[in-house]
């Protein structure tokens, strides 16, 4: 990654990094996501908020391709991808983190990040027989990249430790490193602050801001409104699967419909 000193200017003539329209998915008659649409421009951060059960994680799964939509369109840099699998979408520059990180617990922190790049062990075995030198060089390069990422995320002192020793917050950082290994242009983050202690929270906010400054567009699901306010010029509010409101964090949080949707929930 190179670090421009000024934020990238939105590309007026080019398609948005991610464009979602009329996305919908039912689970046994319950509309988990029902007509959601938004546009994420290159280098932009868009927050996604809403009470538990609003459909945020389901919307992510639809965008990432781990779940098929019943209807709607998803375009990555102008290319419709709703018919493609998750792996193809990663190849198009889309990466995601999960709300609940699931690292390989006995594998080292570094290897957890390396394997995010080389998931296809069957292909690798064949390639290592046919071109052992090239595979070794690629693996060395992947380890170097993985190490740079865990250093960027302050996990380098834990590189050789099994992932099971990580705290909840460190697991979030590992999850972020794994997603960055794909060199995404669009990053989907599902509650990166959940269960993170306040000291680490500031660090995670600062790192997400830095990732974004380097030109990666970010779609950020988060309950922590401090994080949303500090990172997102604009947010989409979902409730009961539907898009309820959008605008600046201040504007949506003072919208009576949003306050109503959150009644009984916890928003500050
Ligand atoms: N795999 C699933 N099978 C059945 N229902 C699901 C599944 N995943 C999510 N749901 C339901 O879809 C709705 C939206 O859930 P979710 O997307 O997890 O919301 P959020 O992330 O906003 O809390 C909820 O009612 C949830 O129970
Ligand atoms: Mg969720």
Image (cartoon, rainbow, N blue to C red):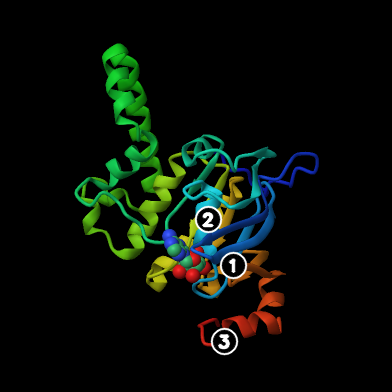
- Label located before the other in sequence (1 or 3): 1
In the image, 143: left or right of 2?
A: left
In the image, 86: left or right of 83?
A: left
In the image, 157: left or right of 191?
A: left
Q: Is mark 2 within 8 Å of ligand 1?
A: yes
| Residue beneath the point at 32% across and 54% down | 102
Residue nearest the observer in this picture, 170 or 22: 22
- Label located before the other in sequence (3 or 2): 2
| Residue beneath the point at 59% across and 67% down | 241
Classed neighbour count for the residue bearing mark 2: other residues with Cα under 10 Å, few (<14), some (14–19), many (≥20): many
Mark in front: 2 vs 1: 1
Q: Residue 30 appears at what percent x and percent y?
A: 53, 67
User: Which image quadrant: the C terminus?
Assistant: bottom right
Q: Which mark is residue 263?
A: 3
The relative height of residue 111 versus residue 203 in the rendered view (above or below) is above
Mark in front: 1 vs 3: 1
| Residue beneath the point at 26% across and 59% down | 166
Q: Is mark 3 within 8 Å of ligand 1?
A: no
On the image, numbered disc 2 is attached to which residue? 60
On the image, numbered disc 1 is attached to which residue? 241
Q: Is mark 1 within 8 Å of ligand 1?
A: yes
Q: Are marks 3 and 2 in contact (CB under 8 Å)?
A: no
Residue nearest the observer in this picture, 145 or 193: 193
- Residue 267 position by quadrant: bottom right
Examine the rendering and report whether any part of residue 191 can be seen. Answer: no
| Residue beneath the point at 58% across and 69% down | 49
Q: Residue 234 appears at what percent x and percent y?
A: 68, 64
Examine the rendering and report whether any part of residue 112 can be seen. Answer: yes
């Amino acid at each position: 990654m190179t670090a421009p000193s000024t934020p990238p200017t939105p590309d007026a003539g080019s398609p948005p990094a991610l464009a979602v329209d009329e996305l919908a998915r039912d689970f046994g008659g319950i509309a988990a996501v029902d007509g959601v649409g938004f546009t994420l421009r290159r280098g932009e951060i868009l927050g996604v908020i809403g009470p538990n059960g609003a459909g945020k994680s389901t919307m992510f799964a639809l965008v990432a391709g781990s779940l098929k939509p019943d209807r709607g369109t998803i375009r990555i840099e102008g290319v419709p991808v709703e018919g493609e699998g998750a792996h193809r979408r990663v190849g198009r520059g889309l990466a995601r983190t999960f709300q609940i990180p699931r690292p390989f617990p006995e594998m080292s922190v570094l290897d957890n990040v390396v394997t995010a790049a080389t998931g296809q062990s069957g292909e690798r075995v064949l390639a290592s027989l046919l071109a052992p030198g090239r595979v070794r060089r690629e693996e060395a390069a992947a380890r170097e990249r993985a190490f740079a990422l865990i250093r960027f995320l302050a996990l380098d002192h834990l590189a050789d430790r099994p992932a099971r020793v990580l705290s909840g917050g460190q697991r979030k950082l590992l999850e972020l490193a794994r997603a960055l290994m794909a060199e995404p242009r669009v990053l989907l983050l599902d509650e990166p602050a959940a269960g993170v202690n306040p000291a680490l929270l500031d660090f995670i906010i600062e790192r997400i801001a830095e990732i974004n400054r380097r030109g990666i567009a970010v779609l950020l699901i988060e309950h922590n409104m401090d994080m949303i306010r500090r990172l997102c010029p604009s947010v989409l509010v979902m409730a009961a699967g539907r898009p309820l409101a959008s605008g600046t964090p201040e504007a949506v949080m003072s919208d009576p419909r949003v306050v109503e949707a959150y009644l009984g929930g916890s928003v500050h």
